[in-house]
Image: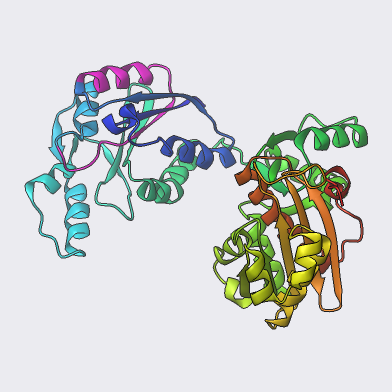
Amino acid sequence: MNIQLLMTGNELMSGVTVDSNSAMIAQALSPLGLAVHARSTIGDDKGLLVSELQRLATTADVLIVNGGLGPTVDDLTAEALAKAAGLPLAEHPDALTHVTQWLATRGVPLNAANRKQAMLPADCELVDNPVGSAPGFRLMLGQCLVICTPGVPSELRRMLADSIIPLLQSRFPGIEPVLETRLHVFGMGESGIQQLLNDTFPEWPDAIELGFRAGLPTLEVKLRSHGHASRHLHEQWKQKVLSVIGDHVVAEGDDSIAKAFVRLLTERQLTVTTAESCTGGLMAAMITEVPGASAMFEAGFVTYSNAMKTELLGVDPMTLEKEGAVSESVVRQMAEGALAHSSADYAVAVSGIAGPDGGTEAKPAGTVWIAWGKRGDIKTRCLLFPLGRRNFQSLVAALGLDVIRRDIMGIISEPRYFRERKGKA
C-alpha cells in the first residue's frame, strides 16, 4: 500500500517547529506492516496546497494530511482539499456539534472563528478527534483516500490509535500485522552483537528481519516478521537471540533501562540508594523520572566536592588526600556511607573524571570507579569511557543501574564491558 504524508504549516517550513508528527505517524503504521512511501511539506499557501494534494493523490493509495484544521485564517486544509476535489465547502452538522460540545465543556461560547472548523468539503466523512476541537475528516480524491488530521501532537496521537489505525484496518482487511521485538541492550556495540549473531547463527532465516538502532545509553536490537503464520518462528528466534545476548538486555519494547529497573526492584520489594559524584545526580534523576519510583528509592546523595563526600557520606579525609576522589577506597566508602544514612537494601556509588579536563596518565579523562552492593558485600570496578562529558555521564548513570540489576537477578557471568572498558586500576 502506498501511503504518503502531506505536512502543512509555515512554522514547519521556517524551522520554528520541528516535524515530529511524521515520525509519530510512521511509528503508528509500522505494527501493521505499513510504511510511509513519501513525505511532502508545504507552507500555508492555498494554491500550493491544492496542487500538491492533486499531485500526491495520483500516486498514493492513502494520503494523510497533517495540520491546518484550526480556527484561524492560515488554517487552509479544508478549503484546499475542497478545491482540489472540485467540491464546495459546507457546514458539517456533526462537525459543528463536535466543536460546540468541545467548547461547552470548557465554558467557552461558540464564535465565528471556531465555527470555521465545521466548514468542510461537502460529503466528507468525519474522523473522530476525541481530545481536540478540530474534527478530522476524510474523502476520496480520485482513487486516493485522503485523511485530514490536526497538527497538535497529543490530538494526532489519540486519533492514530482510536480512529485512523482502525479505519485502515477495516478499509483494507488484507493488512497483516507485523510482529516486532525490540530489545534494549547495554554494554555491547552493534558491530559486536552482529558478529556474535553471525558466528552463532550463520543461517539466519529470511522471514525474520534483524535490525539495529544505535543510541545512548542503550542500543536497540529489533526483530521483525510479517503475518500470523510467522509468530512461532518469531518467538523461537527471539529466544535464540536472548540466549546469546540476554545478560545485556536491560529492557524490552517501550521500556527504558530506568523503567525496567524500577519495576524489578518494586516487584522484588527491594530499595536502592545512590551516591554520585561525576554524574551529578543523573542516576537518581533517571530513577525518579519513572512513576512509582518512591516504592524503591529512598534517597540519593550528590557529593561533588571532597568536603561533601566526607560530611554527608563519612568518607575518610585521609583516604581522599592519599588516593584521590577517583579511587576504589573512596567509592567503597561512598556506597557504605549511603547505606549507613538510609534504610536501602542496595547502594551504588560512582566517582570519575568526566572530562575533558582533569585527567592524568594514571587516571585519564573517562575513568570511573563504581561500587555497588549490599551491607557487607560491596563490589568495585574501574572502567574507562573516553567519551564527551554528556555521553560519559549518561553511560555511567546507566552502568549504575545495570550492575544492581545484575546483582538482584543473580547473573553470575561478568558483562563484556568489564573486560572491554577496563580502566587503569
Asked if 332 appears above or below 152 in the picture, the reply is below
Give the color scheme: rainbow, by chain, secondary structure or one colour.
rainbow
Q: Is residue 347 above or below residue 414?
A: below
Indicate left or right for 121 with 175 as reference: left
**Residue 85's spot in the image, x, y percent?**
24, 23
Between residues 117 and 216, which one lies in front from this camera angle? 216
Q: Quadrant of residue 219?
A: top right
Residue that appears at 81% across and 38% down: 193
How many callouts does the rendering have?
A: 0
> Can residue 331 be seen?
no
Magenta segment, which residues? 47-72
Percent from the top left, x then y, of residue 178?
A: 64, 40
Residue drawn 59% across the image and 71% down it:
293
Is residue 69 rendered magenta in the image? yes
Between 36 and 305, the one nearer to me in the picture: 305
Q: Is residue 270 above or below residue 161?
A: below
Spot occupied by residue 353 in the image (x, y as percentages of width and height): 70, 50
The one nearer the camera, 274 or 213, is: 274
Residue 215 forms part of the magenta stretch: no
Out of 175 and 21, give the one closest to the viewer: 21
Query: On screen, 323 above or below 55?
Result: below
Q: Position of residue 311 (x, y in %)?
A: 65, 76
Please say whether residue 146 is visible from this viewpoint: yes
What residue do we see at 62% from left, 71% from top? 300
Q: Quadrant of residue 124?
A: top left
Left or right for 49, reference 92: right
